[in-house]
Image (cartoon, rainbow, N blue to C red):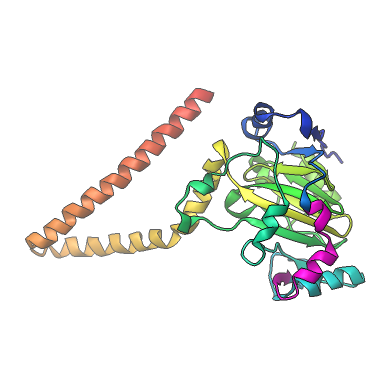
Amino acid sequence: MSVYRPDVEDITKVDNTQFSEIFFNNTTPVQYRNIASEMPAYKKWNFDFFKENCKEMLCQVSDDLNDPANITRKISISEYIQMVQDGKECPYMTGWSYQKSFPSLDDDIFFPEFHPEDFIEMLPKRMQFRRRWIFFGKKGINCDLHIDCFSTSAWLLMIEGQKTFRAISPLDRHNIDMGASLFDSKVVEHLNKHGVNIVEFTLTPGTILYVPTGWVHEIRNDSDNIMVTGGFTSQQHAIRFYKNYHSYISRDALESDLAFNNYLKMLAENDAPLSNEVINSIEEEVSYTQEKIDLLMQKKRLYESMIKATV
């Protein structure tokens, strides 16, 4: 088997240019070590801290460990942590979106200077969404193979314990079934035969891993652990994100447009006379439609120029 393990960069030697070259220009994951030890999360966050402070807060879990993305119920965070500490069998805990119920936790973490600005912050407030989660990992219970929500990029910051991260490029997505595992030796052998590069990182306290948009990945819990992670999108990576996000938020609008177009065809076939008021509404709709067409054509020209400049 062949798994590529990139070097871990020392965070004290990295600047914005180096980060952009690896993460954006080459679109590859990159991990840094020596995150400042004085970060409050390292001193405050442990299982007992969350068990004491999250008695009334709920997390989502899956009792089907073969399909951990299938949420089956909610339990208190304290109850879940107690199961982890007891060493008994327990369900898989999906990420706890803590910012609504425990927003002060954001004060306990901070990022390197090169941490990129988030395009999502530029969207209208009503279109933004919470995108930070805390994971309490149980040894032997792994997440499923997946792509992050809307193909956002991600950062993974370990607080306690150890995980192993494996991933393949979105360019190789067609070579694997999403029900497979990158920790299955037969799957690894299959990917090797097809020339697919599997990257692996060991996640430990003091490290932060940046994962580019669209990368297919899976994480193994090597020990009981605590990790905080977040989604973001910046620079060129926003292109893949926005396509997926816009497809999601506009899915009902597309169906509505198709239904309305069919209705217009029926009206046109009736050949009924139009009042001045109806003609005015059509003229307004034509102007509105033209604005959307102009915007789409502008985006198309920009994409074409970006590709042309690269070739």
Q: Quadrant of residue 144?
A: bottom right
Residue in front for this viewpoint, 48 or 276: 48
Q: How many marks?
A: 0
* Residue 137 against residue 189 in the figure, above or below: below
Front residue of this view, candidates 128 and 248: 128
Q: Looking at the image, which residue is at 75% across and 75% down?
A: 55
Taking the view exactly as shown, the residue that stands out farthest to the right is 87
In this orientation, does residue 189 appear? Answer: no
Name which residue lies at 66% across and 46% down.
Answer: 173
Name the quarter where the N terminus is drawn: top right
**What's the magenta region?**
41-61
Residue 189 is left or right of residue 130, and the answer is: right
Quick check: 145 left or right of 280? right
Asked if 119 appears above or below 144 in the picture, the reply is above
Closer to the camera in the image, 128 or 69: 128
From the top left corner, tell me how far across and down residue 79 is, in percent: 80, 75
Q: Quadrant of residue 33?
A: top right
Name the side, left or right, on which 43 lies relative to 276: right
54 in the magenta segment = yes
Residue 254: name its quadrant.
bottom left
Query: Is 288 in the magenta?
Result: no
* 120, above or below 84, in the image: above
The percent coordinates of residue 209 (x first, y second) are: 74, 43
Residue 56 screen position, x and y as percent: 71, 76
Residue 40 visible here: yes
Residue depicted at x 62% and y 44%? 213
Where does the image place residue 170, in percent across and percent down from the top left? 64, 43
87 sits left or right of 126 in the view:
right
